[in-house]
Amino acid sequence: MAKIKISPLDNVEVNVGGEYDGHKTAIRDIKKGENIIKYGYPIGHAVEDIKAGEHVHTHNIKTNLSGILEYKYEPVDCAVKKADEKLTFNGYVRGDGSVGIRNEIWIVNTVGCINKTSEKLAKLANEKFAGKTDGVFNFVHPFGCSQLGDDQKTTQAILKGMVNHPNAAGVLVLGLGCENNNIPVFKEVLGEYNPDRVKFMSTQEYDDELEQGVKLIGELVEYAQKFKRTPCDISKLVVGLKCGGSDGFSGLTANPLVGQFSDLLIAHGGSTILTEVPEMFGAETLLMNRCRDEETFHKVVDLINNFKEYFMRHNQVVYENPSPGNKKGGITTLEDKSLGCVQKSGTSEVVDVIQIGEHVKKQGLNLLTGPGNDIVAVTNLTASGCHMVLFTTGRGTPVGAPVPTIKISSNSGLAKRKPHWIDFNAGPIVEGEVLTQELLDFVIDVANGNRTNNEKNGYREISIFKDGVVL
């Protein structure tokens, strides 16, 4: 059985193969109370003496994480050298200058009460207008009514972000009529819009809402057909970075690969968005010290501590992670997971922190608030304008965002077992292969129109973040 030592400072190494594939083994004797070092940083401390060669996991490690911390800005030089080579993809240039990589029609529901209506409309429209666009898609959720204050504002911010997404050539905003987030209220949140691109319908106002809905979608399809793929600079791409169902190889293969891609895209003027704030706990200083300036540093401090306060407000500990699947795959503590997770951000400087529903304002690496929950996270990334999501996984999951979701396996076994889930295999990196260019080429192919497995299988869904009272 082979073993991998990640950093010269580590006192554990990762097993490759065997019963504890992806799990950690002590390199030397470790005393009770001594820190366990992986990736060159503590991932917790030993709760008992550990002998060299012994399995190191949940039975003999405890997290070092606690509550709110104070941080000091200690900047490091991490500016990425701009690339000389010009790269393009074939996208759809919208009327407002934004660029999409799909020419779809989206049905965005203001409220959960009309979820089934939107499903029927999507089915009818896809049958009637087949082949005229990249498809008609609806996204169900249970909210939009009986919510109060900031909770409803979050729902509205996500729906606004989706309405404004450039992958949607046309959008039907579908409401009931009596909900808190009714169409007149939502229009105030939405602000300016192109009436050729965005149509509205309150279903209570029509005797036959399906007939009227198909009519409006037909108008949107006609508008969408005006757009054709044209060469666009790769700097127009915004790519979301996400991991879920991780294992002990995620921080060795898939996540570092995504980080290398992120640096490469940013070098070409593009943007990436890293989210899953709880999975930054324990590795947050690595991101803070990469902030472009002190103002951005303070934004990241607020990002981390505000999310810790969210946990504490609900009487939950800030280190309640990783999940059972993560632990089975060899990840022991939240620090263990976080130090692997933040590798998706590469080495670029952090240029900004954005809130739920906000689109990128500064090109480069952005951090987005929100939890690590897979469906919530990909929804937040979509609402922030990501053209696609790079989703690494060591355990496997079929879940997909409304946008193309490239599943990247951390190990070759998963890629072989689940070819209908996995789009790209990062497993060969363990044997020393370099796959950065291959991933960049794959991303460009997807931007050009090649469909990902979530698109082929219809795995598109949203889940709206909730933190408030339901009436």
Image (spheres, rainbow, N blue to C red):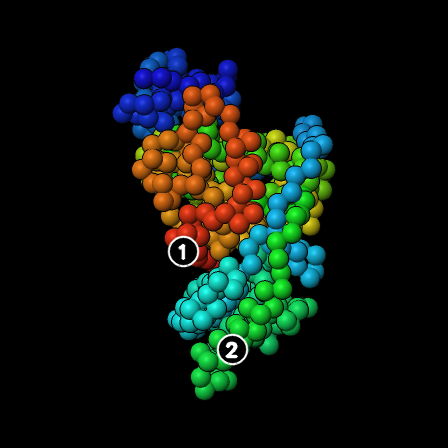
Say if residue 122 shows up in the picture.
no
Number of dots carrying numbers: 2
Q: Nearer the viewer, residue 347 or 279?
A: 347
Q: Nearer the viewer, residue 118 or 41?
A: 118
Inter-mark Cα distance, 2 to 1: 24 Å
Q: At numbered mark 1, what does the secondary structure look like: helix, strand or loop?
A: loop
Q: At numbered mark 2, what does the secondary structure look like: helix, strand or loop?
A: helix
Q: Amino acid at mark 1?
A: Gly
In the rendered view, would you say 119 is above or below 18?
Answer: below
Quadrant in which residue 27 is drawn: top left
**Mark 1 closeness class: few <14, some 14–19, many ≥20 residues within 10 Å:** some
Which quadrant is home to the C terminus? bottom left
- In x, y percent, where is residue 466? 48, 59
398 left or right of 199 in image: left
Q: Amino acid at mark 2?
A: Lys
- In x, y percent, where is residue 262? 59, 36
In the rendered view, would you say 78 is above or below 383?
Answer: above
Query: In the image, what residue occupies the spot 63% across and 71% down?
Result: 196
Of the residues under marks 2 and 1, which one precedes in the sequence? Answer: 2
Q: Which residue has dot 1 on it? A: 458
In the rendered view, would you say 242 is above or below 455?
Answer: above
Say if residue 346 shows up in the picture.
yes
Query: In the image, what residue occupies the spot 64% across and 72% down?
Result: 195
Q: Nearer the viewer, residue 10 or 18?
A: 18
Q: Which residue has dot 2 on it? A: 215
Point out which mark residue 255 bears.
none
434 left or right of 365 in image: left
- In x, y percent, where is residue 50? 34, 18
Query: In the image, what residue occupies the spot 48% across and 85% down?
Result: 206
Query: In the image, what residue occupies the spot 38% across and 48% down?
Result: 398
